Amino acid sequence: MNWFQKLVQIFKIKDLRSKILFILLIFAIFRTMANIPIPGIDAQGMKNFFNQFQMFGLLNVFTGGALDKLSIVMLGLGPYITGVIILQLLTMIFPQLERMYKEEGEAGRQKFNQYARIATVPLAALQGYAMLALLSQQNVIVGLSPTLLLTSILTVTAGALFLMWLGELISEKGIGNGVSLLIFAGIVADMPNNLRQLLVTYEPARIPSYLLFLAMAIIIIGGVVLVNEARRNIPVSYAKRVRGMKMYGGVSTYLPLNINPAGVIPIIFALSILLFPSMLANFLAGAGGWVGALARGIGDFFQDPWVNGTLYFILVFVFTYFYTAVTFDPKAIATNLQKMGGFIPGIRPGEKTAGFLYYILNRVLLLGALFLGTIAILPQIVGGVTGVQVFQFLIGGTSLLIVVSVVLETWRQINAQLEMHDYEKL
């Protein structure tokens, strides 16, 4: 069955059609809110700010263009994602939290998610205040009185919570992960602006650069799909067991290890770390004396493209290993295999199996970490080689990775529902 026939079949099935239309309705609500600005914005000052601070341009990608418009959902899903990440990191410190997340099943995960929702509120208020205060210092927002500042903080905090709710609605009633789909919608929605910018800045003398740019974009898309789908399959066998009059086990399967098990989370980590000293330096740059001079020096240091790119790559590489260590536990997998009578051929169950999984994971993860680090700094590399700073959708590695991952995962879920529908007819 080709893709067109599947598309027709999707809209013939009432349940599947309703889910897709529901997701499109949520997308429409999200994009409408992303274009409602808070008061007191200097549009030209906002443009100059994003030209001066490139890292905020990347943060704008995750909000679907809502940040550069200073809309009521300017924070996007960042506070909620940050809350989830912080709680996942805390599982390494607090055993009780780890048991809740990993051992208490669905009830434990629901309680864990509730903690993440609660943590979203102070994180959104803090991030909203920091962004508004910084933009006010840069004269992007004018006339920001204490009353208007408080109102704006409450507004953007409510916007972040509303987006979190929309994402959970999609996860509950739609197809796929709601948070990923909303980020995907924001990235794709900015594509017409990139096309318009390409047409406005078009110069015949730069056609070779455009062609090189397009060729690199195609190669990058192919590489993202290849690495995103790549697996390292570890063979697993199950011993035969006799219970009563029946025999169980005696089958062989495999344990898949993704080359990139961390997704885009390490990029979000690294972006947050890099943004913090820049924002702090801009807060203190107006101060007098050695404090202001030191802040301006730190700000200039982090704005250097070579320093920024190198630190970004290193942080993404390190966080790939770090986040995988939080979410993937070879000891737990080895224990579960042993309990179910499974083993890796040639490897003794228990600690030997866990050591073997660590060994394979570290080798596979090296490729994934290098891939993520390269994807993160790719816009700077391609822009430097071609001299073209437009059409970022194609080579904005982070956004491209998100788009490809979400499309592939959503299409897999749609296929699964189509197959279930076929089984029901049988």
Image (cartoon, rainbow, N blue to C red):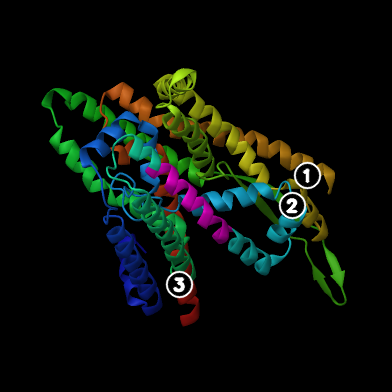
Location of residue 407 in the rendering, given as x and y in whole percent from the top left corner = 40, 54
Label 2 with label 1: CB-CB less than 8 Å: yes
Q: Of the residues under marks 2 and 1, which one precedes in the sequence? A: 2
Amino acid carrying mark 3 in the image = Lys
Tell me the number on the disc at residue 354: 1
- Residue 195 in which image quadrant: top left
Q: What is the secondary structure assignment of the residue under circle 2?
A: helix
Look at the image and give the residue range highlighted in magenta. Answer: 116-132
- Estimate the spatial distance between the alpha carbons at disc 2 and disc 3, rounded to whole Å: 31 Å
Residue 327 % position (x, y): 65, 49
Q: Which mark is residue 173?
A: 3
Q: Nearer the viewer, mark 2 or mark 3?
A: 3
Residue in the picture at 72% in, 65% down: 104
Circle nearer the viewer, 1 or 3: 3
Q: Quadrant of the N terminus?
A: bottom left
Q: Residue 172: x and y, percent?
A: 49, 70
The vertical placement of 287 against 241, above or below, is above
Residue 10, quarter of picture? bottom left
Residue 291 to residue 72: above or below? above
Could you tell me the amino acid type at mark 1?
Ala
The reply, left or right, for residue 112 in relation to residue 189 is: right
Decide: few, some or many residues near mark 1? Use Cα within 10 Å; few <14, some 14-19, many ≥20.
some
Which residue is at the far bottom? 425
Q: How many numbered markers are drawn? A: 3
| Residue drawn at x 79%, y 68% as measured from the top left | 248
Residue extending farthest to the left is 204
Q: Quadrant of residue 109?
A: bottom right
Q: Nearer the viewer, residue 228 or 397?
A: 397
Left/right of residue 90 with respect to residue 373 in the rendered view: right
Asked if residue 351 can be seen in this view, the reply is: yes
Residue linked to disc 2 = 333
Element on which disc 1 rests = helix
